[in-house]
Image: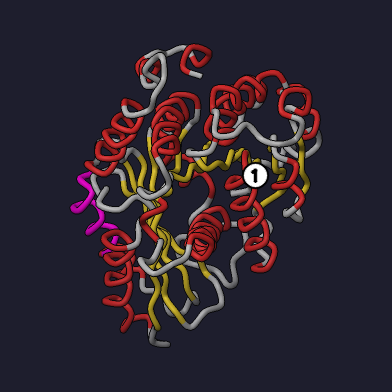
């Protein structure tokens, strides 16, 4: 799937750069353009991709200080400027636009849904949001911001691919090491998802293409992605159990949104050397996913690539009914109620007007 990436805010810019670098290093050529947008000039200086500084007249390049309403206002005021910076990047080659943001910060949580709305108005390709939830230890304002932003992104985007910070952060990680680990995990999983069908070595029996990714996400809502790999035999017949095992591990222990296996739709991509991929193993793993997710709409296919391992990449669409989402929204609501404000910032959560919400 050929995509254009737009990172909004500090986390969004870093994840966008990690995705672009992974795609370049692997030679996939799925990322056709990358831009980082922020209100904080210092955050943009750390990046090697193209950047766009917005809101200089409001915050003088110093960021919005966690104020996602201000972040949304600035993005709305500077939408024309951002679209100008995107001019020539979103071409007929692009099959989707992906807005990348940390949903806890001010610029990302406020600006991402506002930019998504503007992109939906102008372009006729799917516009997805790749959103990162703050960890439990990142403070009440980040939880409250993410709760509001999550609900708004679900409404504005064609699908919200959600990453839970706590999913891949080790207990002994420092803050910086934890974010680096998460960025690497996102780049590997989401980067492979975008690359599926774009750059393959050899010919698979049933190669996944971009239409299957789009169809898995077509019903909207929240999506999750997982990945697992294991050494493979040179004999495809001996890899049936390997494929089912790594698929089980991807779904049960390595999803970006843990404990969210009930889904509306799913996609299984089995990556590896084409001579090592067993079609019987792929089909068996796909049927297991149907039983586990409760969905009869689980697609499956190959991603031929030069590797001595077999890997399973799992994409689930429509996982918003999960207990993990409800748990987070409850935490966000509690954080909002505990903040000393004149009004309840969660009041707009049920309002369908973005301007009122932000």
Figure check: 138 above or below 195: above
User: Magenta part of the protein: which range?
Assistant: 285-296
Q: Is residue 122 left or right of residue 222?
A: right
**Colour scheme of the rendered structure:** secondary structure
Which residue is denoted by mark 1 in the rendering? 5
Q: Could you tell me residue 104's position as x and y percent?
A: 48, 39
Residue 18 seen by the camera: yes
Q: Could you tell me residue 216's position as x and y percent?
A: 41, 42
The number of discs equals 1
Q: Is residue 206 left or right of residue 122?
A: left
Furthest-bottom residue in this view: 234
Figure check: 225 above or below 333: below
Q: Is residue 166 left or right of residue 156?
A: left
Q: Is residue 286 magenta?
A: yes
- Taking the spot 34% from the left edge, 33% from the top edge, the residue there is 335
Q: Could you tell me residue 31's position as x and y percent?
A: 67, 52
**How packed is label 1: few (under 14 Cα within 10 Å), some, or many (20 or more)?**
many
- Taking the spot 20% from the left edge, 53% from the top edge, the residue there is 292
Q: Secondary structure under badge 1?
A: strand
Q: Is residue 350 left or right of residue 74?
A: left
Residue situated in front as seen by the camera: 257 or 287: 257
Residue 192 seen by the camera: no
Image quarter of residue 113? top right
- Taking the spot 38% from the left edge, 56% from the top edge, the residue there is 314
Q: Is residue 194 magenta?
A: no
Figure check: 22 above or below 64: below
Q: Could you tell me residue 193's position as x and y percent?
A: 51, 55
- Taking the spot 69% from the left edge, 47% from the top edge, the residue there is 43
Judged by its main secondary structure, the magenta piece is helix
């Amino acid at each position: 799937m050929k995509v254009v990436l737009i990172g909004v805010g500090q986390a969004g810019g870093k994840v966008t750069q990690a995705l672009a670098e992974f795609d370049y290093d692997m030679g996939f050529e799925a990322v056709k353009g990358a831009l980082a947008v922020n209100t904080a000039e210092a955050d943009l200086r750390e990046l090697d991709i193209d950047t766009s500084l917005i809101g200089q007249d409001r915050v003088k390049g110093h960021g919005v200080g966690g104020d996602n309403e201000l972040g949304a206002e600035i993005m709305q005021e500077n939408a024309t400027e951002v679209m100008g910076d995107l001019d020539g990047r979103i071409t007929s080659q692009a099959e989707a636009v992906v807005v990348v943001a940390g949903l806890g910060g001010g610029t990302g949580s406020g600006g991402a849904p506002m930019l998504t709305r503007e992109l939906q108005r102008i372009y006729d390709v799917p516009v997805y949001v790749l959103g990162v939830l703050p960890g439990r230890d990142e403070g009440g304002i980040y939880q409250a911001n993410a709760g509001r932003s999550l609900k708004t992104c679900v409404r504005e985007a064609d699908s919200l691919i959600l990453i839970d910070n706590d999913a891949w952060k080790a207990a002994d990680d420092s803050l910086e090491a934890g974010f680096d680990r998460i960025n690497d995990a996102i780049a590997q999983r989401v980067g492979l998802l975008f690359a599926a069908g774009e750059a393959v070595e050899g010919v698979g029996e049933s190669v996944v293409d971009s239409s299957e990714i789009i169809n898995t996400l077509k019903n909207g809502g929240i999506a999750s992605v997982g990945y697992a790999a294991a050494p493979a035999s040179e004999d495809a017949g001996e890899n049936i159990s390997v494929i089912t095992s790594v698929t089980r591990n991807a779904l049960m222990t390595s999803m970006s949104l843990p404990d969210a296996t009930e889904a509306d739709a799913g996609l299984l991509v089995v990556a590896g050397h084409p001579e090592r991929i067993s079609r019987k193993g792929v089909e068996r793993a796909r049927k297991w996913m149907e039983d586990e997710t409760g969905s009869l709409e689980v697609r499956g296919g190959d991603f031929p690539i030069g590797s001595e391992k077999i890997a399973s990449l799992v994409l689930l669409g429509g996982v918003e009914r999960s207990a993990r989402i409800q748990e987070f929204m409850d935490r966000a609501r509690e954080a909002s109620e505990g903040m000393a404000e004149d009004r309840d910032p969660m009041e707009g959560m049920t309002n369908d007007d973005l301007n009122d919400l932000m």
